[in-house]
């Protein structure tokens, strides 16, 4: 079938993207789903910094590529058991094979065949269903239809508005999961979140959910700091202030028990580490350029029993966690609808990524 989608053929074109137009809306041939795959009519797809990192070249991927990895839609055709036409799904951006060593340990986010397929720009099967164009993280949600592996799909409540449902596939799963799964924050422990985009604010919501206290939110955009306070941050810190780390340490009586870095910057990761107390845990969620490195005083890892942890996909098991988070949203305990800044059209994506790069939006969602 012929689909209409946003294709990136060259990374690193200069901003503003409304002028350089790195994303071109094209008509492409989409092959039918193979065994274990689904044809999905995409209803909505979120704009994430992981997409922007491919556009600006800081997260290199094979080209050309149809972007979009945070998506929801309706199954049109199923070649996989357990799914039928009419099912509404959210897409997870790591397809979990279920058989490799990490999957066997319950660490679906680290699926080895899934990571290999994502790097190669294919589906989990190793195949491409887009003619001459690579898949983005097994989803390619910036198109009216997509073929995805069933291992990338999680059935969800069909009454959920699509612009909200899309958020659970990346922002919510990654941010809340970093708190709940990776760090396993306990009630009454202090937490600081660096970076208040969709993932960072989801981490903040996760910290509120588990009863962390106090909660410090750090960013450079005043409107994001104001929203963080509304969502439950007890203290907000403008990172442009030269004493941001000292402000955090003051607000947490000597340093946070847990620090979450969601910016994708080695410099910010060093600040997050410096803002934790003795025995503290720093969790990094952002994806910096592969050339970036960070350093810490090596002795502090031992003498102060510090911990640094990575969190990918929120250390989630999507089939378990997405339905849980949707239920918590329905119960009013995860107000993820507050993350939605605007809805956009396919032809407006380049301008929308300018807004994302400028920090003037949290989560914009492409609606079909």
Image (cartoon, rainbow, N blue to C red):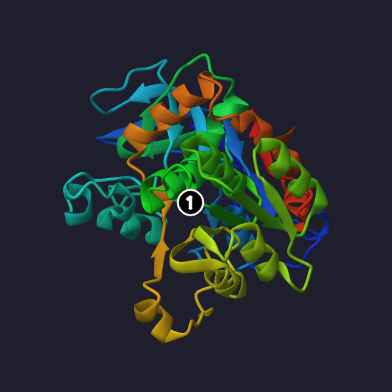
Q: Residue 204 versus residue 167: which sits nearer the camera?
A: 204
Instruction: Say which quarter of the image contains residue 307.
Output: bottom left
Label 1: how many residues lie within 10 Å, few (<14), some (14-19) or many (20+)?
many
Q: Position of residue 178 (x, y in %)?
A: 44, 50
Query: Quick one: which residue is furthest to the front in this view?
Result: 253
**Residue located 42% across and 15% down the image:** 86
- Residue drawn 54% across the image and 78% down it: 292
Q: Which percent across, then down, holds residue 50?
A: 56, 55
SS for dot 1: loop
In the depicted view, which residue is nearer to us: 190 or 290? Answer: 190
Labels in figure, total: 1
For residue 326, above or below residue 192: above
Q: Residue at x 64, y 39 (%)?
A: 232
Q: Position of residue 107 (x, y in %)?
A: 27, 50
At 52% from the left and 66% from the top, the residue drawn is 276
Question: Which residue lies under the disc numbered 1?
Answer: 136
Q: Is residue 89 above or below residue 85?
A: below
Q: Relative to the observer, which residue lies in front, 148 or 246? A: 246
């Amino acid at each position: 079938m012929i689909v209409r989608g946003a294709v990136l053929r060259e990374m690193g074109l200069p901003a503003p993207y409304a002028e350089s137009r790195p994303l071109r809306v094209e008509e492409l041939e989409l092959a039918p789903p193979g065994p274990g795959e689904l044809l999905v009519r995409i209803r909505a797809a979120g704009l994430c910094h992981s997409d922007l990192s491919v556009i600006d070249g800081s997260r290199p991927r094979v080209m050309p590529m149809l972007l979009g990895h945070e998506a929801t839609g309706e199954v049109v055709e199923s070649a996989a058991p357990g799914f039928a036409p009419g099912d509404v799904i959210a897409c997870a951006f790591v397809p979990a094979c279920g058989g490799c060593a990490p999957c066997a340990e319950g660490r679906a986010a680290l699926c080895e065949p899934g990571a290999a397929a994502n790097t190669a720009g294919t589906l989990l099967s190793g195949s491409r269903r887009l003619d001459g164009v690579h898949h983005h993280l097994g989803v390619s949600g910036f198109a009216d239809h997509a073929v995805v592996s069933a291992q990338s799909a999680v059935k969800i409540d069909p009454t959920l508005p699509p612009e909200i449902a899309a958020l659970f596939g990346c922002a919510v799963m990654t941010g809340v999961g970093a708190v709940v799964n990776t760090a396993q924050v306990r009630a009454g422990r202090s937490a600081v979140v660096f970076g208040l985009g969709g993932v960072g604010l989801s981490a903040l919501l996760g910290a509120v959910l588990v009863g962390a206290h106090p909660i410090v939110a750090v960013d450079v955009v005043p409107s994001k700091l104001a929203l963080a306070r509304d969502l439950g941050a007890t203290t907000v810190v403008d990172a442009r202030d030269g004493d941001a780390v000292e402000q955090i340490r003051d607000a947490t009586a000597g340093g946070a028990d847990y620090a979450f870095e969601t910016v994708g910057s080695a410099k910010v990761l060093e600040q997050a580490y410096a803002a934790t107390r003795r025995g503290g845990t720093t969790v990094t969620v952002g994806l910096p350029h592969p050339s970036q490195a960070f350093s810490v005083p090596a002795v502090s890892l031992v003498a102060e029993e510090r911990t640094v942890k990575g969190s990918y996909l929120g250390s989630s098991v999507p089939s378990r966690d997405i339905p849980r988070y949707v239920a918590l949203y329905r119960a009013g305990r995860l107000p993820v609808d507050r993350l939605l800044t605007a809805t956009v059209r396919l032809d407006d994506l380049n301008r929308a990524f300018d807004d994302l790069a400028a920090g003037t939006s949290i989560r914009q969602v492409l609606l079909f």
